[in-house]
Image (cartoon, rainbow, N blue to C red):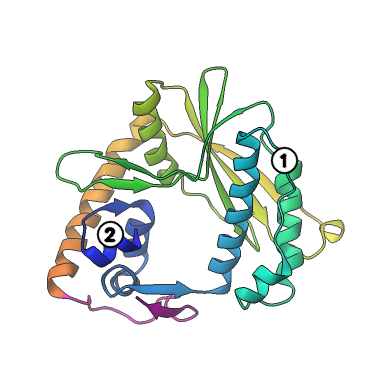
Amino acid sequence: MRRLDRSGVPYLSHSKVASLERCPRCYYREYVLGARQESEALHRGILFHHAAKTFYAARKDGERINPVISAKQIRAKSLPAETLPMLRNALKLLQKNQWEWHAILAVEECFFMDLVPGLPPIIGIPDLVLSRDGSLLVVDHKTSKKFNDVDSSQLVLYAEFFRRQHSTTAIIGVFDEYRLVPDLAKINKPAFRRTPVSVDRCFLPKLIARYRKAWKQMLSIQKHGEPAGSSDCWTCHPISYSYW
């Protein structure tokens, strides 16, 4: 995606749209100027997703491995020392709650889709796609220090791609959420939550309208430069940037 951004190739992704909706200035910095976001939460998420990808990719190949994150990886990301036990606990929960008795179709495999005329190609990278008894499950991993409200629209997009690819309507979306805690033995509420969500095609028109609106605004920003607005975005201040 960064190569596409540097080359000025038009495309959409759900994260790109969400960045624009959250803060047009953040979008301008990241996708027009080429700034790379840097934050502890982002690094933690990247490390967890990499470990989960390795774990499920091995499962897909018929292997059984332990999902691990090393102290060396934490130091490389300049994260606080307490981050390692939190991530290791999250991976223990991933292993404990792994998707057994499902065939693994895809693990973080990128796809391109022409969603509708008038929009550029859509790029998506689902965390995990499973199959069982003719039904598909599109799974999204989330890590944070607390459980948050889930937005199923990204999974609606992913489901539409696999609906077209596999000619099936039997698809559900699932959020696997991992609450980052220092000690699993000393918590009063669960640190793992699995939430099924509907990805019915009835949600698609609203998603397409959202993407059309965002694409129109992206073209305007590309033409006119940095958008005006408040600099009080909660995302801008705690995040530093490095550029291409």
Q: Residue at x 77, y 65 (%)?
A: 85
Q: Amino acid at mark 2?
A: Leu
Q: Quadrant of residue 181?
A: bottom right
Q: Is residue 64 left or right of residue 186?
A: left
Report x, y in % for residue 151.
46, 49
Q: Residue furthest right?
A: 185
Q: Which numbered disc, 1 or 2, marks the residue that appears first in the sequence?
A: 2
- How busy is the neighbourhood of tag 1: few (under 14 within 10 Å), some, or many (20 plus)? few
* Quadrant the N terminus occupies: bottom left
Q: Residue at x 36, y 34 (%)?
A: 161
Judged by depth in the image, the label closer to the viewer, 1 or 2, is 2
**Taking 65 as reference, is 51 above or below it?**
below
* x then y, percent, for residue 20: 31, 63
The residue segment tinted magenta is 225-244
Residue type beneath disc 1: Asn
Q: Is residue 190 visible?
A: no
Q: Residue 230 got which mark?
A: none
User: For mark 2, does the 10 Å Cα neighbourhood hold few (<14), some (14 to 19), or many (20 or more) residues?
Assistant: few
Residue bearing mark 2: 4
Q: Is residue 40 above or below residue 170?
A: below
Q: Is residue 184 above or below residue 54?
A: below
Q: Residue 241: within the magenta?
A: yes
Cα separation between marks 1 and 2: 36 Å
Choose top left, top right, bottom left or bottom right for residue 71: bottom right
Say whether residue 16 is left or right of residue 71: left
**x, y percent for residue 60:** 60, 35
Residue 97 bears which disc, if any?
Answer: 1
- Where is residue 77 shown, x and y percent of the image? 60, 74
Q: Are marks 1 and 2 in contact (CB under 8 Å)?
A: no
Quarter holding the C terminus?
Answer: bottom left
Residue drawn at x 37%, y 40% is: 157
